[in-house]
Image: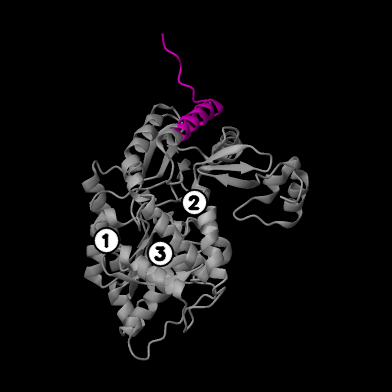
Amino acid sequence: MTMTYQQAQVAAREHLLLHFTQHESVFRGGGELLVLERGEGPYVFDSRGRRYIDALSSLFCSQLGYSYGEEMAAAVNNQLTTLAFNTNWGTAHPAAIELAAALAERAPGDLNHVFFTSGGSEAVEAAWKIAREHFVAQGQPQRTKAIARDRAYHGVTLGALSFTGLAPMKEAFGAPAVEVHRVSNTNAFRATDGDDQAFAKRLLAEVRATIQAAGPDEVAMIIAEPVQNSGGCLTPPPGYWRGLRAIADEYGILLVADSVICGFGRLGNWLGIEQEGVVPDLVTTAKGITSAYAPMGAVFVGSAVAESLHQPGVTLRHGITFGGHPVAAAVALKNIEIIERDQILAHVRATETHLAARMDELRALPIVGDVRGAGFFHCVELVKDGVAARFDQAERDRLIRGFLSARLREAGLIARADDRGDSVVQIAPPLICERDVLDTIVDRLGEVLTDAAAHMGLDVPVTA
């Protein structure tokens, strides 16, 4: 870093606009911005040399952690000295072709075509446009509506924002570009159905009723994450995804799995949907496709949709200049090679039960109401009474923004305290983490949550 620590703080305050940030609160009273300079394995180091466990994989991206830079740099150098750039607009380059073939080979079912983007929001928006082109080509241009879940996050470009179910992210930007009808998410913690089967049945009945109300021949797609991020690692009840597939087939609707977060090993498989035993028509990905060594996203497209785009006279009226950039594609190919060589998917599958068991121990804390997740993607839902009572807005501000953010950093742990919906703390460690690192993450999280309970006045009295 060429700037001193203090120079960097001043320059950030005066010149850098941070994403999803209340700038005044970050810099209030001379407050300091966390500036990370270096990574090694599952650890990152700030500009003062302090080490943190990156228990969030830099926002669900760094599947391989931070020690593969030399291999990635070699792949980048080879590409830059061969062909620095070419678009995929009516032409192509070897890296994009090879990557599309490699991804299709590893995808389930007939997801055998790939459209490249630069990130997750772009992938969701591209999926919608591909869906629309498919239905126009099929003589069904009236299919202009979509079904998405409450509180789900699907991106923030204006098209993708239509599918996002978080009102505070949407209201300032006017009417959505796409008419989207909402259905319930899969938070079983507060469900009153009695068991998973009844819960799934109710959720699917709601999806069916919503489609009927919207007009079955006007709905183009159903979009959902395999495990919903916003709201806190919301796993589906057994049979839910099979039910979605059956409903989509019944009404001729495309089923889209948004695997931007869940893909590339996060749940122990390539696309984060394989465990559900269904093949969606489209799958959106990003983040882990390169383990964040380069920016990239993609849409996997099934054969029926792809065939529509190959009809005579049909033009796919969507494109992104840097989608499938040769350097990003070279990094993604190297990422696939490393994941397979180092048996990363098998490691997640072999270790996820240990992580889940350790996380489940946190239920004993008075501030923890629920623990849930899958693979290397888990959260605790925070409550004010040891059972299910929600914190109000003032309490959430005091807990999430006023206490947990600083206390997690003090513990040397990067995790996500969030209240888009209910109050949660999420972890999504790099997939290279061994059990000892996972144990340290959970131990530190337990210490932080114990202090949080005391901070909120939730200490359990000591009994004689």
Mark 3 belongs to which amino acid?
Answer: Thr
Q: Residue at x 74, y 49 (%)?
A: 8
Q: Mark 3 falls on what kind of element? A: strand
Q: Is residue 253 above or below residue 238?
A: below
Q: Nearer the viewer, residue 354 or 78?
A: 78
Q: Which mark is residue 244?
A: 1
Q: Nearer the viewer, residue 458 or 36?
A: 36
Q: Quadrant of residue 172?
A: bottom right
Q: Nearer the viewer, mark 1 or mark 2?
A: 2
Q: Which residue is mark 3?
A: 284
Q: Mark 1 falls on what kind of element? A: helix
Q: Is residue 453 above or below residue 112?
A: above
Q: Residue at x 68, y 50 (%)?
A: 23
Q: Main secondary structure of the magenta part?
A: helix
Q: Is 128 positioned to the left or the right of 274 in the image?
A: right
Name the spot of residue 49 as percent of width and height, x first: 66, 39
Q: Is 395 positioned to the left or the right of 180 in the image?
A: right
Sequence-first tag of 1 and 3 = 1
Q: Which residue is mark 2?
A: 62
Q: State yes or no: discs 1 and 3 in contact (Cβ < 8 Å).
A: no
Q: Nearer the viewer, residue 86 or 338?
A: 338
Q: State yes or no: discs 1 and 2 in contact (Cβ < 8 Å).
A: no
> What residue range appears in magenta?
440-464
